[in-house]
Amino acid sequence: MLRPRAIVVGGGISGLMASLRIAELGGHVTLLSTLSLHRSGSVTLQEGINAAMDTKKEGDSPERHFQETIRGGDFLAHQPPVKRMCEAAPGLIHMLDRIGVPFHRTEEGWVDFRRLDGSLYHRAAFAGTTTGQHTHHALAGQIRHHESKGGVTLYEGWEFLSAVLDDQLMCRGVVAMNRASMEIRAFKADAVIFCTGGLGMIYGGSTPAILSTGSAAGVLYQQGVYYANGEFIQIHPSTFTGPDKSFLISEAVVSEGGRYYVLRDKEPWYFLEEWYPPYGNLVPRDIATRAILKVVENFHLGIEGEKEVCLDVSHRDPDSLYSRLGGIVETYRKFAGQDPCRGPMRVRPNVHYSMGGLWVDSCRQMTNIPGLFAAGECDYQYHGANCLGGNALLSSLYGGRVAGESAFCYIKGLEKGTDSVDEGYFTREIKKQTEDNQKILQKQGSVNPHRLHQQLGTLMRENVMTIRHNKVLAETDEKLQEMMEQWENNLTMTDVTHWANDELIFARHLRSMLHLARVITLGAFRRNESRGAHYKPECPDRDDNYWLKMTKAKYTEKGPEFSYEEVDTSLMRPCVRDYTTSGVLV
């Protein structure tokens, strides 16, 4: 067989890791990226990368890392792949250190580690507050090296439109469009790995990058890939609102001494430290978010009546803050107009990360469509109902590596490669996507796609955030169906050109967002319990007897069809998730 050929869609950390692994194994990668490599959303990840190396002699271990991850995810993650990730983490840190990630160092010169939310251990290796940026740039350098040797062919500025499936529903490649020339072409491969990020822009004005629309995942969902655990959307406790989006204030701030408080009787009340003594301000994000909402909504102690609390680092030495938190300090200064070194930051909960994503198996990162793999935030695998701080970067690295190795092995085992597949599959898909573009450009109704997206974001932020009510969720789905009807029959395109038409691309993204918004909303409606990032006041407790299950949504023309998959709890028995005590598990 010829040199194994794979396509990787997405130039973030998971995509780079998958591409690197395939190239190292001797395969060839066609890497498609919507933007230039150095503009990936991965560069915004701040706090660090978890790896239990116990350099501070606290008794940490991969087993403790695994236990805290499973408990942090409220026991909704398959346990064997999570354990393999935790065991692989130290080796990944050594690899990143070797290729040039400038991790913060101790006085002795060792990689330093900070403690992040949900953990009792200093486990996260970090590069100031730009860990994602440095990790991404180091991996991109490796990809450029393999590009020069012919192992990688890079296509920047290409928009994924659809997967190419044969009659056996095996993935044989993709169809993509050049964002400048609008040329549509097919890319052939024996396996395709999707590393296309999250879907935070369904909520509008959230912390993810502006292109985190979930569009690729939405397209694949409509082509038959299961979408798993869509209802679990992580709300980060500390963000602030900028001109067009929210900005994240990483847990790194809390790790470096930041303290949440509100004024009660004109005195600071450090409510998290009072309610959760062992963890204090470093409780998991879902716990911190619900505590903040309790303080501002039930106790009416938000700043100036807003759903905001104080996050204070002004007591810390400014030089030390700049050394370890410089990026966050400068971001808040620039976009909030205040100096965190001189007074508390005003923060509020907002959408940050998706726990749900494309369903993949527990060993190979392959979806239910043979030859189609997924890794990074666009898959659902490693977090369960909530993400442990420092695991987002880790899961992107590890999932990308597993997907790359699995895709390579899959290709080697194929009896018939894509070269022997009928060319008609590719020409028909090109024709289909070309006609779809033409239909969209001909829409001359009265609804602007950007206005419709604003309505979608407002609807989801108001009704499908941390606290969910079944009546409201049912009403939300009805409104989402009305929006889909508006998209189909009453959309208007103000830009009908055939060159660099960003409005056409956005309209396509919006269609995918509407489909996934229904998956999120109806998944939440059906799950009658409270778990992790999903909380229902009418069902305030976790229900392991009935809901220790993964949600799997299948696309139908009438809407998502749901089934459920039992969670593999073979390595750790579910227990009470209590952060008021140390909760050390042995």
Image (spheres, rainbow, N blue to C red):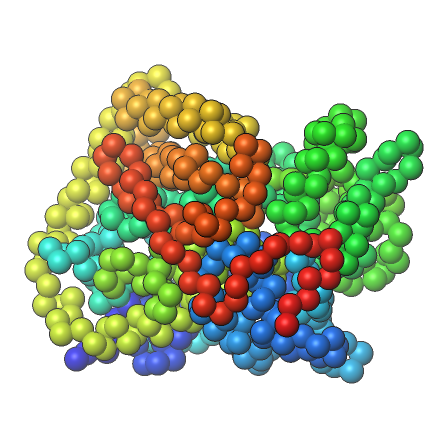
Res 274 visible: yes
Q: Quadrant of residue 102?
A: bottom right
Q: Residue at x 27, y 22 (%)?
A: 489
Horizontal placement of 382 versus 175: left or right?
A: right
Look at the picture and state if 66 lies above or below 313.
below
Residue 9's spot in the image, x, y percent? 35, 58
Residue 404's spot in the image, x, y percent? 36, 71
Residue 530's spot in the image, x, y percent? 54, 42
Residue 120's spot in the image, x, y percent? 71, 65
Look at the picture and state if 226 lies above or below 559.
below
Most foreground residue, 167 or 19: 167
Q: Residue furthest front?
A: 545
Q: Residue furthest right?
A: 266
Horizontal placement of 162 versus 216: left or right?
A: left
Quarter of the rendering occupied by the C terminus = bottom right
Q: Residue furthest top?
A: 446
Number of disc labels: 0
Look at the picture and state if 229 lies above or below 491.
below
Q: Residue at x 74, y 35 (%)?
A: 295
Q: Quadrant of residue 117?
A: bottom right
Quarter of the rendering occupied by the N terminus = bottom left
Res 159 visible: no
Q: Quadrant of residue 373?
A: bottom left
Q: Residue at x 36, y 69 (%)?
A: 363
